[in-house]
């Protein structure tokens, strides 16, 4: 197992379907984890799931589409631990079956804010600290759906394509500064909400959150120090 003893990982969306698996993976690897959440019920589920490892877990409530709240989370993390070694941005959302000709501006704006703006704000807030400490790992979550857009999902596809471009732009800016920036591009993640949305799908072909968590954990490790600016597909067997 990759060891993260004494490392500090800031995970946005850390209590969601993917987030719980990633949070648990970092805790099992010995990290101190700050998990950012919005839903109290999801926080309670996470605390129950991690058991005794909760002593290395801090949960903070924030809307990461709002810069003041992002800055507050980052400041609280630095105040408590003195550093941020890893940032994983997992906040996002999906819509489908809305053609461009029928899409409302508010829906478009919501998808951009939830998927792209949140990633931008979190990376912006953390980068200064990583540059000062001379090291860091940033992993964003893109999507296969931005590479092969599906009808009716334009807002989601554009937002995730923006995450891909943002990831590579940040990677170019910090090249040579001992900060690795990469994105994972999952297919459909096997979460309860996705099963509810697509009840007739073949779930066995989807990406298990635990499998995606292992990829993220690797990218956050020193073993991945030569991987930089990569968009890594994790499509499952579908």
Image (cartoon, rainbow, N blue to C red):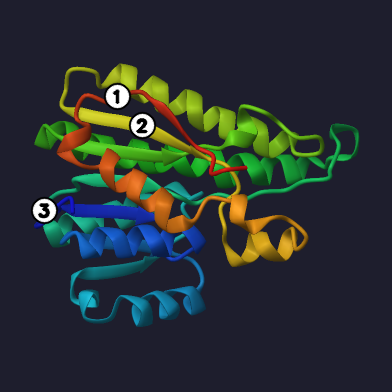
**Image-based side of 223 in relation to 103, left or right:** left
Q: At which x and y percent is residue 151?
A: 81, 35
Q: Could you classify mark 2 by the number of other residues whose Cα lies within 10 Å: few (under 14), some (14-19), or many (20 or more)?
A: many
* Residue 68 visible somewhere in the drawing: no
CB-based contact (under 8 Å), mark 1 and mark 2: yes
Choose the circle earlier in sequence order: 1 or 2. 2
Q: Which mark is residue 228?
A: 1
**Distance (Cα) linking label 1 and label 3:** 25 Å
User: Is 88 drawn above or below residue 173 in the view shown?
Assistant: below
Q: Residue furthest right?
A: 101
* Residue 194 visible somewhere in the drawing: yes
**Distance (Cα) linking label 1 and label 2:** 6 Å
Q: At which x and y percent is residue 163?
A: 50, 32
SS class, disc 1: loop
The image quadrant of residue 5 is bottom left
Residue at image position (57%, 47%) is 114
**Image-based side of 28 in relation to 92, left or right:** left
SS class, disc 2: strand
CB-based contact (under 8 Å), mark 1 and mark 3: no
Q: Which residue is mark 3?
A: 82
Q: Nearer the viewer, residue 146 or 236?
A: 236
Choose the circle earlier in sequence order: 1 or 3. 3
Q: Which mark is residue 182?
A: 2
SS class, disc 3: loop
């Amino acid at each position: 197992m990759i060891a993260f003893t004494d490392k500090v990982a800031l995970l946005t969306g850390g209590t969601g379907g993917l987030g719980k698996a990633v949070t648990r993976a970092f805790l099992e690897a010995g990290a101190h984890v700050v998990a950012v959440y919005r839903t109290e019920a999801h926080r309670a589920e996470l605390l129950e799931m991690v058991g005794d490892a909760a002593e290395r877990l801090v949960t903070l409530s924030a809307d990461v589409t709002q810069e003041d709240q992002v800055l507050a989370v980052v400041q609280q993390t630095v105040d408590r631990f003195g550093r941020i070694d890893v940032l994983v941005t997992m906040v996002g959302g999906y819509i489908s079956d809305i053609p461009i000709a029928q899409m409302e501006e508010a829906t478009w704006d919501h998808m951009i804010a939830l998927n792209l703006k949140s990633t931008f704000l979190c990376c912006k807030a953390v980068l200064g600290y990583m540059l000062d400490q001379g090291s860091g790992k940033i992993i964003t979550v893109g999507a296969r759906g931005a590479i092969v857009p599906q009808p009716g999902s334009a807002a989601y596809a554009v937002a995730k394509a923006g995450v891909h471009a943002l990831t590579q732009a940040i990677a170019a800016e910090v090249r040579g500064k001992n900060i690795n920036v990469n994105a994972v591009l999952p297919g459909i993640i096997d979460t309860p909400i996705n099963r509810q949305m697509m009840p007739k799908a073949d779930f066995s072909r989807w990406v298990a959150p635990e499998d995606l968590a292992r990829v993220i954990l690797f990218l956050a490790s020193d073993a991945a120090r030569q991987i930089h600016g990569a968009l890594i597909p994790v499509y499952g067997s579908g």
